[in-house]
Image (spheres, rainbow, N blue to C red):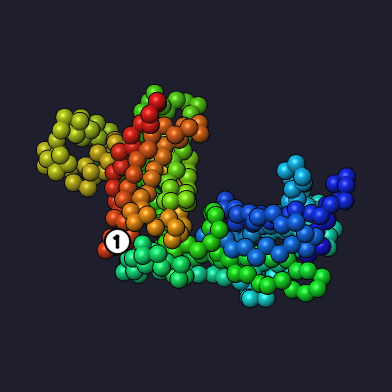
Amino acid sequence: HGLQNEATMFKRELNCSVSMKIGPQEATTDNISAATPVWNEFFDFLVYDERQCAQLTVMDSDFAGRQHFIGRSEDVPIQKCIEAGADGLWVPVYQGSQSGKARDSKVLVSSTMYNLAADPEMICGILDRALLGNASHSTGLQGGDSSSFRGASTEQTEQGEAPVAHRRTTAAVRSGAIILLVCDVIGCYVPDEVATADALIEIKVVVGDHEASQRVAKASKPSYGPLSDKVVESINNLSRHGMLAHQISEMLGEELANVQRVIKHAAWNYEVGQKMSVLVHPADLKNGHPTLDIFFLVKGRVRAQGTVDATDIFRSSTARLCSVVDCQTTVGE
């Protein structure tokens, strides 16, 4: 409401968009040409705690596509947005610093929180409906321990309130997610010729049109508890010569779990510090055979990729799957 841009030389109708950010997750509305635009758009964000905050930024796009800053909100607690209910929360937009004078500009945000249910049977039911093309009727999000926040930002005209929209929140594009997929990359092996000292390496996971990525770091030296360095070296040597974990355990008189831990860590030289979460939408499943695609990127370029059948995950009796994925080098690399 009351959006203004004093930086423009000529008087013209504003062409505004709003970006909403919660932590590293960000979503942006389409541009609307009006001084009091009504976006009425929905987005999904993954929220771990209601004490997290959202921040809104309003931008104006001119005839040449150049972006002009209109204003930014202070940090808005998610809990405050939820407590506002269906009426929504008017959020002031500041042109200068947060301590500066608030302009007349403000954005109306309405939100709904959804709890996640780790129920494999429910996931299979949602998957079946999605594959049949009926998933648009589903509203449940399935997955881990977090919640999904549906937030909507609209604005008010001088004649009265705009229709209030409810939104979801997650790292990406629009709303309507039905499954939360959490990917934990325990470790990975990157060839030395690829992993140069200055290489920026990322892992990206993709389901349909939705994705998440994390930086890859050099694997830290693990602690093997009671095992000495000499025993660890012996385990690795025997493993390289083709001996299995239980055979090494019997030969050296060490606990099987400790031997398995050594062999597992010897197989990788990089690790990913954080899990990656992807909100899966009905359209991501409609080809009947959804896949989880994994990409290795070095300095922004895809160097290798692998694939996991996503239905194996969704239809698992525990809604979990542990797998070693062989990522093949891409053509020309």
Q: Nearer the viewer, residue 195 or 280?
A: 280
At 20% across and 30% down in the image, what residue appears?
240
Q: Is residue 234 visible?
A: no
Q: Splitting the image into 4 quarters, where does residue 311 fall?
A: bottom left
Q: Is residue 19 left or right of residue 221?
A: right
The x and y percentages for residue 181 are 41, 56
Give percent across and percent down for residue 74. 72, 58
**Residue at left offset 73%, top offset 51%:** 59
Q: Which residue is mark 1?
A: 315
Within the image, what quadrant is residue 280 found in?
bottom left
Image vertical order of residue 331 relative to residue 52, above or below: above
Residue drawn where x is 78% and y is 74% of the image: 160
Residue 118 percent location from the top left of the image: 37, 66
Asked if one can make out residue 86 in the rendered structure from this viewpoint, the answer is yes
The quadrant of the image that shows the N terminus is: bottom right
Q: Quadrant of residue 224?
A: top left
User: Can you say whether 190 is above or below 207 in the image?
Assistant: above
Residue at the image position 75 percent from the left and 56 percent from the top: 33
Instruction: Name the foreground residue: 221 vs 278.
Output: 278
Relative horizontal placement of residue 72, taking residue 280 as reference (left or right): right
Query: Looking at the image, how many numbered discs can be counted on the residues?
Result: 1
Q: Is residue 309 left or right of residue 1?
A: left
- The secondary structure type at the circle numbered 1 is loop
Q: Residues within 10 Å of mark 1 (few under 14, many from 20)?
A: some
Query: Residue 52, position in %: x, y?
Result: 59, 61
Looking at the rendered image, the quarter that the C terminus falls into is: top left
Identity, as a three-letter code, of the amino acid under mark 1: Arg
